[in-house]
Every structure is written in C-alpha cells, then in structure tokens.
Image (spheres, rainbow, N blue to C red):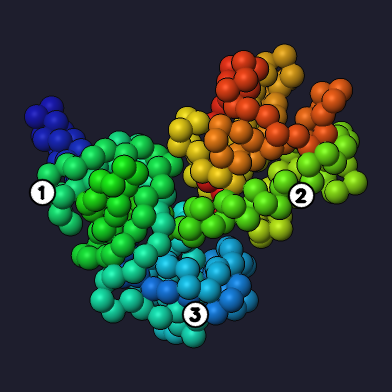
Amino acid sequence: MTHFAGRAAKVLIFSVMTTMLLAATAFAADIATGVGSITGSAVRMRSEASTSSSIVTTLDKDSAVAILGGSAADWYQISYNGSTGYVSSDYLIEDSDGVFTSYGIVNSDGVNVRSSASVEGACAATVSKGTTVTVTGFTNGWYAVTCQYGTQGYIRSDFLNLSSSASSSGSKVVSLAKQYLGTRYSYGGASPSGFDCSGFTMYIYKQFSVSLPHTATGQWQSGVGNKVWSVSALNSGDLVFFCDPSRSLGKACSHAGIYIGNGQFIHASSARSGGVVISSLYEDYYSRYFVGGIHAL
C-alpha cells in the first residue's frame, strides 16, 4: 500500500509540474518581444505564415502591432486588437527605440499599472477590462501607458491589446452611422432601404471590414473585439447590447446599437416612430436592460 501511495504521489507531483510548465509556456508566448509598424495599406494578417492561408483581419498603414516570438522566415508573428496572426516582413518595420504612440485596450480585469516595467514596481493604478489607454513606448515586454486622468506607468504586454486610435476609428463609425438617421425599420433588413437592429450594426461594421452575424445575440457572442460591462467604459463607435426578457425568447440579447458618446447610442428601433434614431442609455428602458458593449475595432 505504501509503495502504491508513494508512486501515486510522484505521479501527482509530475502531473502538477507538467501542467504548470505548459501553462507558463503558453502564458509567456503572449508576451511581446517587440513592437512594429505596418508600412502598407490594407495589409492582410494571415492565420499562418503563408499567402495561401486565411485572412484574420486587415491592418491600416502605420498601425502599431505587437511582435511575438516564434516568427517564420520572412514573416512576423504579431498581435493586434486581440487577434494573432502573421504579416509578411515586406509590410512591417520593427521599432528600434521603444518610443511610439498608439492606443491599447486592457484585456483582463484588475490589471495593475506599475510604476516601473516590472512586477516589482509599485501599483500606480488598477484598471478594468475594456479600459482604453494611450501607449507611448515598449520596454522588456511592458508597455509605457498613460491612463484616463493622467496616471502614467507600465502594463505588461500580455494584458493589453494594441489598437487603432479609439477616437479616430470610433468617430468614423459614428459619422457613417449618422448618415442613415431616419432610415425606416424593416424586420430582417440589412441595407439602406431598411434595417432591423442587428442588420444596422452589421451593415455599418461591414464597411470597416468587421464581419458580424445578423442577430443581436450572435454579435454579442461572436468573439469580435473586447467586451465591456459598464457605460463608463464605452468608447464612441462601440457596439452596445440589451436584453429585454419579454422579447429575447431566452437568448442573451434582444437589441443592438452603436454608442456615439455622451451616454447616447444610434440604433434601428422597431417602435412605431422608430427607424434609425438616437436614444439615451440612461432612459429607464435601456438602462434597465443594458447588457454591455464591445470594442470591435
């Protein structure tokens, strides 16, 4: 009995150590080894290091991207806006001095902003998932950041997704969406001749190369972008979702729209005087049934 107990203990210890090693390896793989800038327009990020592999997303010129380890010859393995893939070295230049300006979205809850680029650095602030920060540099796997209200410090790169300017991208989404104010509501509609709620958000985001399904629940569960859970964490251009149990038929969401700032959102409403309109998130109905938002760009 003692022999088998000792053997079982050894097996358990080996199993735990193996699990920890695998977890550490996977965790380390997410930490950036450098930062690069996209040099072409509409550059394709591929799922593999090959022009024949599927397209993950397209990248704008001058976008800052995280460079990950293990890149193939003539290709960089990169991460951008929560997506990971490969870009040809013909379209990316590595940052040499660790000084640049971009935006980042926190991808986990309770992330510490450190006073130095180390876990030993004092905690200057704690930020929640979905928070947007300004990124001003990179050193040893950490981003130098400036948070809302001016707090400065460092966030480890695996807790932050580099992204395009929240204000620039979001304002373009909002500007396009507002062009369709007054468009009639049409159940199942997804074109300027008539929209339903998810058809409207799907159509607008399609113009920015973001593919969304044609249901509110499908968009909420699509895995696109990063979710936020409070109105205060929303940026202009974010998707917003609601769930009225009397209309959701047991699904996660019953309605979708696009946040335009100042507590307002634009959406295709099925109300009698509806169509594409602007409403307040603080109205009793919408505040009661607010589910959350998605930073989709």
How crowded is the residue under tag 2: few (<14 C-alpha within 10 Å), some, or many (20+)? few
What's under tag 1, amino acid-wise? Glu
- Mark pair 1, 2: CA separation: 50 Å
Q: Secondary structure at mark 1?
A: loop
Q: State which tag comes first along the sequence, 1 or 3.
A: 3
**Residue highlighted by disc 3:** 39
The residue at 48%/58% (across/down) is 165
**Is 37 above or below relative to 280?**
below
Tell me the residue that label 2 is attached to: 179
Label whose residue precedes the other's in the sequence (2 or 3): 3
Residue located beneath label 1 in the image: 120
Q: Earlier in the sequence, mark 1 or mark 2?
A: 1
Can the viewer see residue 226 in this picture? yes
Residue at 78 percent of width and 37 percent of height: 276
Q: Amino acid at mark 3?
A: Thr
Q: Is residue 238 visible?
A: no
